[in-house]
Image: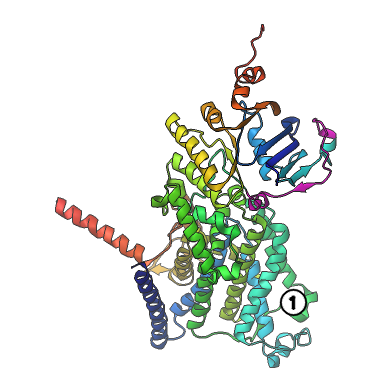
Amino acid sequence: MTDVVLRLENLTMQFGGVLAVDNLSLEVKKDKITALIGPNGAGKTTAFNCITGVYEPTNGCVYFYDEAIVSNRPRGKMKKLYAGENTNTDRRIISDTHDMNTKMGIARNFQNIRLFKSLTVFENVLVAKHMRMKQNVFTATFRLNYREEKRVREECMELLEEQGLLHLRNEMAGNLPYGLQRRLEIARALATQPRLLLLDEPAAGMNPQETQELADFIVRTRDKYNLTVFLIEHHMDLVMRISDHIYVLDFGKLIAHGTPEEVQNNQRVIDAYLGVAEDA
Amino acid sequence: MDNSIKKQKIILTAALIIGLFGLLLILEQLLPSSSMLFVVLKKGAIYALAVVSMNLLNGFTGLFSLGQAGFMLIGAYTYAIFTIPLEARDMVYQYFDGGIIKFALPVIPAIILSGIVTAIFAYLIGLPVLRLKSDYLAIATLGFAEIIRAFFQWDKLGPVTNGSNLLKMYPVFHSVIFPFAVSGICIAIIVLLINSSYGRAFKAIRDDETAAEAMGINLARHKQISFTISSFFAGVSGALLAMFQTTVQASAFRATMTYEILLIVVIGGIGSVTGSCLASFLFIACSEWWLRFLDNTTYIGSFKVPLLATGFRKVFFSVVIMIIVLFYNRGIMGTNEFSLDALIGFFRKRFDRHRKEDTAA
């Protein structure tokens, strides 16, 4: 077993003439917290969407535990329009859909919260268990899967209790306050029994106090569930505190990577965030 | 504690159902069988099933489909074709040498078969159509429903479908108990489905497709399941409708019928089973019985009441739809379900408020 959970190889995503992600290669190591940072519009979320299967990348591969889950090369109309480097060695075309990747053990949250608003908190978590239940429509309708259902319900209760959401389990998810919605979304992602957790700006809209708590929470969760965490974040204090390795993206290109200290002192990163003086 | 309450609830529900059927039996003994009430009850029960099956698709899975009339047509035809008694076949299929089907099924297997045949059709239609979303899906399903209607009237299919002629003389029901029982069982199954793990997955798809997929729900498969099951029950309701009407003709299953059912779904509340049931009885009662007077020219003394003429009922309904859509777009029940607890809670709240006001005064 290698210790590389997720490997991106020459991942490129082109929208029209815009290279949103340009030849991105990176590795996420097992049990580590890896961060992907960069200014707004650097292509971080696009990279996430390529990994999970929301988008089909124009070029490049994604390996999950050394198994290719996404692989594409410019073809059809894209062959002419393609502006990136064509360095994909894997000639296969694999485009797993989002649900297949989730089944393999990649869970994610969304930058703009996407809860099932008209379902209760409890049901939101139960939905995540649906794919792992041994059942079909008939056994589910006529409650022949009641043992399975009971087991899953208990698991979800436990999960909600850990997340401190148990007392809210019968609330509509849409009625929860913002912070709790974020927490519920992570709980829901954990309910899919992931091996890799992708967090897309989990601290967006949180105050420093809440961000602090979230940082502790991420570390705690990682230890408890033996997870590997890959996160996008703008709160630098959070990123610098908990990350083991940081990748910096600017205009779709990887401009630096390394430990938090290395990245902080990298001139290109500073330029990307603060801009370069005209007369320099 | 929890279990005893659950048991009580089950007993109470069972008592209610038995009470309902008892009431129906008594009514049948007391009133003449030609009473308008029975027409309303029979048609209401059949429509309730059609509406709930459409609600499963539109309200619970978020698939805006307008194929209901087409699927009911398939159900109605399947039922009629397979149950016409052998001795009557020569007469029904007079232009087609008695048709090519030389056997007749009993009623219950035929009803189940009509559901299955409809489900098979729906599965095949669903393969291409369910790739579409929202309005496009509605247009495509509407188109397919029209194609089905034309297809069943096709002369070349005459030996099976009797072309554009009537199908008749198949077994029908006389008691109001029969449609109530069949619809009741089917609606109960739909409710069980909605409350199962699959029902939760359907609702998740309705709320947010991307998030549902991120939760490992296979969108294509689940939409297909919902579409097929919904059509199964639409087929069953079509079979019941055929029994109610005693004759079947493809030209009756127009898009208007789908709109009627959609209207009931909206009145009852998109995403509420009990709302759908209530609304279908209410709608059928209004259109068949209570508002019939709108269609008749009426004189009070020598004064001719204005506007009341044939077709005015339709105008009235259009206005009602507009009012509902504009001011009351959650329908009777919204997404809530009618339950005894809720009813008791509702009255208790009222009662408490009154008492508070009294003490305040």
Residue range in magenta is A80-105
Please provide percent x and percent y for residue B93: 73, 85
Tell whether B191 sits left or right of B112: left
At which x and y percent is residue B355?
Answer: 19, 57
Q: Residue at x 67, y 7 (%)?
A: A280
Q: Nearer the viewer, residue A98 or B117?
A: A98
Q: Residue at x 75, y 37 (%)?
A: A9
Residue B207, compared with residue A177, is above or below; it is: below
Residue A56 included in the magenta stretch of the image: no
Instruction: In the rendered view, tell whether residue B159 sits above or below residue A124.
Output: below
Position of residue B216 in the picture relative to residue B125 (left or right): left
Q: Nearer the viewer, residue B316 or A241?
A: A241
Residue B291 spot, x, y in % from top left: 44, 67
Dot 1 lies on which element? loop
Residue type beneath disc 1 = Gly
Which residue: 42% across, 53% down? A169
Spot occupied by residue B344 in the image (x, y as percentages of width and height): 31, 64
Report which residue position mark 1 lands on. B163
Residue A102 among magenta residues: yes
